[in-house]
Every structure is written in structure tokens, then in C-alpha cells.
């Protein structure tokens, strides 16, 4: 149903009058619908806090920003209600913030149908990347598959021949497995789909042990990843069957929670705290000082999303002007190189990270290699904006 509606919206958008982002002289309202409660609550908090940091440190210049934030509670129906209230009652025409792909698939059609613009700081489902792409829909983070394609390539490069795959049974989880398989050249020993509300992974631990793979790829963001790694240790699998992960399964917050369990694990990401560029150094220092915690890649994406939106607003407040400016990607990303592909998803580099002890003796994700260069996504060629 979502895809059918999306196709209709893409055609209708070309006939609709361009959205007005603000009235002359008024503050620009940006609607941020994000996950702030439950196991994924810190993901939305990092996005929100980093976006606000960009506002506070002058990313928007003299333009006044009214950031309106609501918690979706990881409930699609709740997110839809918020989006419709923002659209109908608050007159908001510029949106961001969604963490989980099932939430984005629920709210994006309503937002785009009203001629509003959505700029994603995280979720990048395949359903919105190809033939159902939309000129008012931009993604700053990644397309979901490409995130896990980097992990598949890393597993291949590391020499693993037989992998067991696990991911939650929702759009991003399915994209994760698809993406990993696309770039992994070895054998799939087995795969399991878990629940987004799952807390006990004992059956999956037994399945991994029975399959006896060279290594495990698992995608479990936020608190799900913390629970999975702790139970992996309790099952006696740490040190016996290595893991090759993408960033959502092991970020700075996850690492702080699980400690030595993660030592030696391999992770891929488009960003890390140690990337050596001035914009990133400034961001990491400012975020750490303000919030007294190490930023996750969710925070880096929230910050970049604010910078991208600010670049769009330099073009003007109307939908067309904003869109035409934003697509140029005229901002300095904290991850380094960044541009939009034809479906308005990122083209960027991907890095191999490893959990090691840093010079201060504390565990850290250390960037070791570049896994993919100028990498886009598998669906861009299907997009016709």
C-alpha cells in the first residue's frame, strides 16, 4: 500500500504548488519526529542534541529556527498522528528526525503528499530509494543496504568464508541482510530474523552455535545491540566466533555499556570520532563538552542534517528554492566527502573500524582501513526524479 501510494505522490508532486517553508520574517519551523523512549531512545536523543548543537553554534546564521520535537515511541500510528498535527495544525513544511525505517514508511507518504519536505538523518529504506523516490525526500545518512554492504565487503576482505546473519524483522533489518549478502563473497551458514521488542536471544545463540560459522553479522541498533552482545558473552560465544558489524550494532554508547565484550570486534561506518578533518574535530569537541558523552554516529548524522538543511535555506524559503539548493550538498560534512546520488541519497566513503584500547587505556573504535570509496546504493538507477 505504501509503495502504490508513493508512486502516485511522485507524479502528483510535480503538479502541486511548491511548499512555503516559512512566512516572511518568521522563524522557520522544523518538525522533528524521533524515537526518545524505549531501547532506541538514546538514538533519537543523539540526533536531537546534535541538531540543536548546530543551531546553537550558528549553522543557520541569522535565520531563526524553531525546532519542534516529538517522541514517536517507536509506534508508527503515533508517528503518523504527530506528522499530521505538525502539517495541519502547526503548518510545518520541513521535517526530519525519524530513526527507524518502519516509522519513516508510515509518515513519509503523509508528509510528501502535503508538498512538505523530509530530510532523513538516519532511516533510508529501500522502498523509498528506487522507483518510488521523491523529489521532496532526501537522505543524509545512507541507504540502508549500503550501510551493510560495507560490512559484507569488510567480512570478505577479512577473509571470512562462512557467516551467520541476524537482524530484526522490519524494513531496515531486511535491507541489512540483503545489503550484506550483496557484497559478501562467502557462504551463508544461516540467518535469523528477530523481533524489535525482543529481549531474550537464547534461541538465536543456540542456532549460531549449531551452524558453527567463521563469524557472525548481526544488526541490532541501540538497546537491542547491548542486550544481544551481553547474551553473546553469556552464551560463551565471545572469543570463539568473531563478529563483523555495521555501526548501528556497536556505537560509542553500546561500547560504553558492554565494555571488554566488544574488544577486537570489527565494525564499518561512514563516520568515526577520529576522522581527521577540521569540521569533525570541532563537532566532536563541542558535542562532548556540551553533553559530557562521546557522540555516536547518530549524533554525527543529526549534526550533518542540520548543516544540510541550513545549506538548503540559503537558497530561499520556498520548497523549490530549498530543494534546488539542498541537492548541491554545499556544506562541510563531518564525515568528509559527501554528495547526493540521483535518488538524493549519499555517495560517500566507508571505513573499517576495530574496538581497541586507545592511548589512554580506554576502549575505543579506531579507524583502520577504507572499505569502500565513493559508494552509492543499489537503487539509485531506478529513480527518476
Image (cartoon, rainbow, N blue to C red):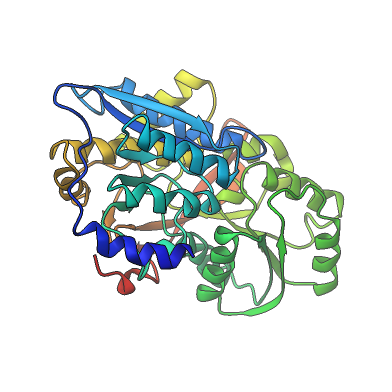
Q: Position of residue 75 (x, y in %)?
A: 60, 43
For the point 51% across and 44% down, the residue is 99
Whether residue 66 is visible here, answered yes or no, is yes
Q: Quadrant of residue 330?
A: top left
Q: Residue at x 37, y 47 (%)?
A: 111
> Does residue 303 appear in this view?
no
Q: Along the horizontal axis of the image, is 195 left or right of 292?
A: right
Q: What x and y, as percent, mark residue 287?
A: 44, 26
Compared across the picture, whether 273 is left or right of 195 comes to left
Q: Looking at the picture, how far across and down is residue 345, in whole percent?
A: 34, 58
At 55% from the left and 69% from the top, the residue drawn is 180
Q: Camera-side residue: 311 or 264?
A: 311
Quadrant placement of the C terminus? bottom left
Figure label count: 0
The front one of 249 and 285 is 249
Q: Is residue 120 above or below residue 143?
A: above
- The quarter of the picture where residue 226 lies is top right
Q: Is residue 44 above or below residue 321?
A: above
- Up-down relation of residue 109 to residue 99 (above or below): below
Query: Considering depth in this image, is 320 or 64 the residue closer to the camera?
Result: 320
Q: Quadrant of residue 379?
A: bottom left
Furthest-front residue in this view: 88
Instruction: Give residue 159's position: percent from left, percent from top.
Output: 60, 73
Amino acid at each position: 500500500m505504501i509503495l502504490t501510494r508513493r508512486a502516485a505522490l511522485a507524479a502528483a508532486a510535480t503538479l502541486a504548488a511548491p511548499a512555503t517553508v516559512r512566512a516572511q520574517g518568521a522563524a522557520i519551523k522544523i518538525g522533528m519526529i524521533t524515537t526518545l523512549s524505549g531501547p532506541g531512545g538514546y538514538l533519537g536523543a543523539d540526533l536531537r542534541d546534535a541538531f540543536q548543537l548546530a543551531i546553537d553554534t550558528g549553522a543557520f546564521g541569522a535565520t531563526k529556527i524553531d525546532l519542534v520535537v516529538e517522541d514517536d515511541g517507536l509506534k508508527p500510528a503515533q508517528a503518523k498522528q504527530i506528522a499530521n498535527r505538525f502539517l495541519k495544525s502547526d503548518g510545518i513544511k520541513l521535517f526530519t528526525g525519524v530513526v527507524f525505517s518502519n516509522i519513516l514508511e508510515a509518515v513519509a507518504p503523509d508528509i510528501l503528499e502535503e508538498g512538505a519536505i523530509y530530510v532523513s538523518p538516519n532511516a533510508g529504506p529501500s522502498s523509498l530509494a528506487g522507483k518510488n523516490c521523491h523529489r521532496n525526500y532526501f537522505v543524509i545518512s545512507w541507504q540502508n543496504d549500503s550501510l551493510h554492504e560495507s560490512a559484507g565487503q569488510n567480512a570478505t576482505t577479512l577473509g571470512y568464508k562462512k557467516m551467520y546473519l541476524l537482524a530484526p524483522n522490519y524494513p531496515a533489518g531486511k535491507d541489512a541482510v540483503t545489503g550484506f549478502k550483496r557484497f559478501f563473497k562467502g557462504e551463508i551458514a544461516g540467518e535469523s530474523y528477530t523481533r524489535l521488542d525482543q529481549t531474550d536471544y537464547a534461541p538465536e545463540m543456540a542456532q549460531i552455535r549449531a551452524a558453527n560459522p567463521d563469524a557472525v553479522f548481526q544488526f541490532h541498533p541501540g538497546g537491542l545491540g547491548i542486550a544481544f552482545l551481553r547474551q553473546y558473552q553469556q552464551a560463551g560465544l565471545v572469543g570463539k566466533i568473531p563478529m563483523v558489524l555495521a555501526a548501528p550494532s556497536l556505537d560509542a554508547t553500546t561500547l560504553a555499556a558492554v565494555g571488554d565484550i566488544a574488544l577486537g570486534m570489527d565494525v564499518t561506518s561512514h563516520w568515526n570520532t577520529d576522522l581527521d578533518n577540521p569540521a569533525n574535530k570541532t563537532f566532536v569537541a563541542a558535542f562532548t563538552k556540551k553533553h559530557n558523552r562521546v557522540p555516536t554516529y547518530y549524533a554525527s548524522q543529526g549534526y550533518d542534517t542540520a548543516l544540510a538543511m541550513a545549506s538548503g535555506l540559503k537558497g530561499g524559503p520556498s520548497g523549490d528554492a530549498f530543494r534546488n539548493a539542498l541537492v548541491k550538498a554545499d556544506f562541510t560534512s563531518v564525515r568528509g566527502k559527501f554528495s547526493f546520488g540521483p535518488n538524493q541519497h549519499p555517495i560517500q566513503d566507508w571505513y573499517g573500524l576495530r574496538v581497541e584500547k586507545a592511548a589512554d587505556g580506554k576502549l575505543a573504535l579506531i579507524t583502520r582501513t577504507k572499505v569502500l570509496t565513493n559508494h552509492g546504493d543499489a537503487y539509485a538507477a531506478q529513480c527518476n526524479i
